[in-house]
Image (tube, rainbow, N blue to C red):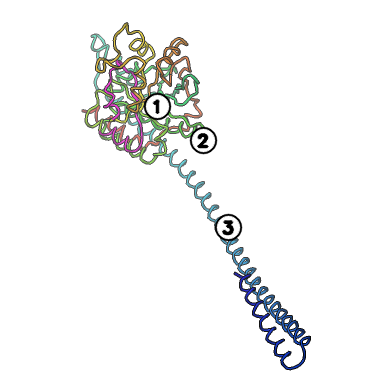
Amino acid sequence: MRKITGGFLFFGYLFLSLAIGQTIWRAGMGAGAGAAGVLGALGVMLGLHAAIAGVLDRRALRKEIAKVREAHRLLADAMESTQGALTELAEAIESGALSKTEALTGEVRMLEGLIQQMSESIDDRLSSSPITADTFEGRRQVQSNTLLKTVHDALTENRVDLYLQPVVTLPQRRTVFYESFTRLRDPSNRVMMPAEYLSVAEGEGLLPAIDNLLLFRCAQIVRRLARQDRKVGVFCNVSLASLGDETFFPQFLDFLSQNRDLKDALIFELGQATFDARGAAEARNMAKLADLGFRFSIDKVQTLDLDFADLQRSDVRFIKVAADLLIEQLLDLDGATPLASQPDIQAADFAPLTRRYGLELIAEKVETEKQVVDILELDIGMGQGHLFGEPRAIKEAVLAETDPPAEFVRTTLQSAEQRRRF
């Protein structure tokens, strides 16, 4: 634009100079004088234009410099303000983390007190009803009470361990999940298998408390793995009693609502029999967990002829089937069809069928390389078992960081106490 304007001004000066030269020539001063007048006038005009343009350019430059300086000042102020805000934020985060740690310590102390009260209540109940060991029923009751006290002592003295077993991709054998297990230890530190204490724990309403410990520790393990940039999920077993407990479950749901970032890494697992036995309340509570984005897994599968549509509607995303059962019902068929409800389905179609319903099949209890070959032949992409790694206990130092807040457990213990009374 400035070039066009300059061109117009030049031609304007030229025409004005020609007019001056013509006037000189008509005045009788000759053609030479007229030409000199033209050149002189043009030179004066161009010089004057250059001087004026220089002044204007300098003024514009000073204005631009002033604008740049002002922008620099504003930027410096903004950077100083941002640095101050970041410093305040860091101090607030550090203070908040400190407060959270202090609160957690207080809650763990509260948990210890509540468990102690619970143990005292159990001691009172056991001592108030003397049992004779002279009869078979009496001996059975004595054994049950002894086991009950062992379970409570394990909770009171924090003899509860977390075990993890890897779930791997096939054939790469890369760990993508862990399955978590809780194990109690008796006073001699002997590890008690679930079959020893689950029936007593369930009868006394203690399964929600055990699930509670497992949930918090799984959540903390997931966060530790995330800090190490290991994006793996953890299967966390949950009992039907926990899903149906009117006192425990709202607290369970509230905790997960505040920790939705765990939804992609925490998968809740139920046995097939447990899943089939769920009632309206349990199904409704599972749906509430699914609404938060959490997924479910079914293990301890007894038959492959499952209701896949029902599993899909219930937000089940994983099915764990024992390797022996898969081989027996899919490869060792002797001409039979694997699914009575779907006679057209062949062995090689089973894994793709589950995927069509959004279900990922995992072969569990894999013990031999021969089983791995058969599993790969069935197009199953994940496996779990002692061949890939046995369940291993998490170190006590790590467990010390994963004790759950007592506020979350309090209503569970109260609910268990109420069930014992009635």
* Residue 210 makes an appearance in the image: no
Alpha carbon distance from label 2 to label 1 = 19 Å
Left-right relation of 118 to 382: left
Residue 160: percent from the left, percent from the top? Answer: 42, 24
Q: Is residue 233 magenta?
A: no
* Image location of residue 299, percent across then percent down: 34, 21
**Earlier residue among tags 2 and 1:** 2
Identify residue for label 3. 79
The kind of residue on which mark 1 rests is: Phe
Q: Residue at x 39, y 35 (%)?
A: 263
Tag 2–tag 1 contact (CB < 8 Å)? no
Tag 3 near tag 2, CB within 8 Å: no
In magenta, the rendered stretch is 284-312
At 63% from the left edge and 69% from the top edge, which residue is drawn?
64
Q: Are marks 1 and 3 in contact (CB under 8 Å)?
A: no
Closer to the camera, 104 or 1?
Answer: 1
**Label 3 to label 2, Cα distance in Å?**
30 Å
- Gap in angstroms between the C-alphas marked 1 and 3: 46 Å
* Along the viewing direction, whichever of 50 and 30 lies nearer the viewer: 30
Q: Point out residue 194 in the picture as x, y percentages from the top left corner.
A: 36, 18
Using the image as rendered, state which of residue 260 and residue 238 is in the foreground.
260
x and y, in percent, of residue 240 in the image: 28, 26
Q: Looking at numbered disc 2 in the image, what kind of residue is underneath it?
A: Arg
Q: Categorize mark 3 by other alpha carbons within 10 Å: few (<14), some (14-19), many (20+).
A: few
Q: Earlier in the sequence, mark 1 or mark 3?
A: 3
Identified by mark 3, the residue type is Met
Using the image, tell me which numbered label, if any, was put on residue 227.
Answer: 2
Q: Is residue 295 magenta?
A: yes
The image's mark for residue 235 is 1
